[in-house]
Amino acid sequence: MNRNAAATPLAVTGLRKSYGDQEVVAGLSFAVPPGTCFGLLGPNGAGKTTTLRCCLGLTAPDGGDIRLAGLPVPAQAPEARHRVGVVAQADALDPDFTVAENLLVYGRYFGLPEATIRARIPELLDFAGLAGKADARVPALSGGMKRRLTLARALVNDPDIVFLDEPTTGLDPQARHLIWERLKALLARGKTIVLTTHFMDEAERLCSRLMVIDHGRAVAEGAPRELIRREIEPAVVEVFAESGEAPAVPEWARAHAGLAARVEVVGETAFFYCRDENPLLAALAGAPGLAYVHRAANLEDVFLKLTGRDLRD
């Protein structure tokens, strides 16, 4: 086996996949170094889940080269998946089994001895914040508990690489923060994470590197802070009406567009992207009825600039 390939948990070159006349992955290339979290970001339909499925050997690509755990995919996908854990969008937990039984049955798919799986269960449940829930049945668990059980299940084979497809969608802030802490603990143990998410703060917290894709193509790649510095103005001022007596925001934004590097109007809110926000703030001080939020640019601003604000189905 090529030593360099083995040292790179996931390497993708020129990946392509079409369904009929629609090309959903159009020549993606990226590499994930060991012990890092790599984020794959994009709107709905951008090709994220298809890319993950190709990387796992669950969907056959039309072109390109994939190396997962140093092995070619899809040719040796089953062997590669033995070193992988997966948290899919749908939990797919068995409601007829207890928490511990879900882990036990899943571990058998990897050919692990029952004694080995049982020995791992207490540690996995403790890691997932589910200590004392071994005998609970799945329907009795909250949404956050089910998601944490899915994460524990993905770790039953002690994988080197963990794929997470929108792992915190639908969770409350407490559950999201707990899962973030668990994922950081995995990274501290040298695990490699491949993450898709619609939460830009999640990507900013967890990812050391990420790629933004749209219509199956890469539109930007880099560390989160690097992308913010490179792709967007440093300050954002969101302007909106504070009362019914306020001037119309779209008209006010057009009249003061020269005070910012770029202005976007969405409904009754104007987003001013500034390199020097002081002239705009001075103008707002003399505009009764208008309110504003002044903040530093973030990854969500980058995402919206690169992929647009239109809704995707």
Image (cartoon, rainbow, N blue to C red):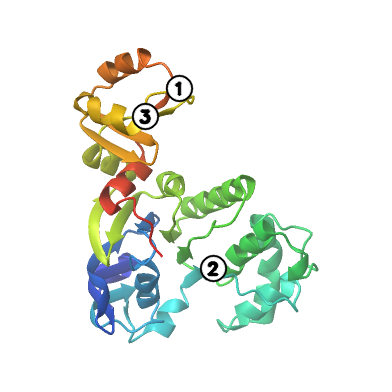
Instruction: Say above or below: 80 vs 149.
Output: below
Label 2: element kind: loop
Percent position of residue 77, x then y: 39, 82
Residue displayed at 80% across by 68% down: 135
Distance from the alpha carbon under mark 2 to that under mark 3? 58 Å
Q: Quadrant of the N terminus?
A: bottom left
Pointer 2 or 3: first along the chain: 2
In terms of depth relative to the viewer, which is nearer, 154 or 268? Answer: 268
Q: Quadrant of residue 212?
A: bottom left
Distance from the alpha carbon under mark 1 to that under mark 2? 61 Å
Pointer 1 or 2: first along the chain: 2
- The reply to whether the C-beta atoms of the residues labelled 1 and 3 are less than 8 Å apart is no
- Residue, far front: 245
Instruction: Say above or below: 255 vs 2.
Output: above
What amino acid does circle 2 point to?
Asp
Q: Name the residue under label 3.
A: 248
Percent position of residue 119, x then y: 69, 70
Q: Name the residue under label 1.
A: 245
Instruction: Between label 2 and label 3, give the one nearer the viewer.
Output: 3
Q: In which quarter of the image is residue 140?
A: bottom right
Percent position of residue 29, x then y: 23, 66
Percent position of residue 274, x then y: 25, 28
Residue displayed at 67% across by 60% down: 143
Label 1: element kind: loop
Q: Name the residue under label 2.
A: 158
What amino acid does circle 1 point to?
Glu
What amino acid does circle 3 point to?
Ala
Residue displayed at 61% across by 48% down: 178
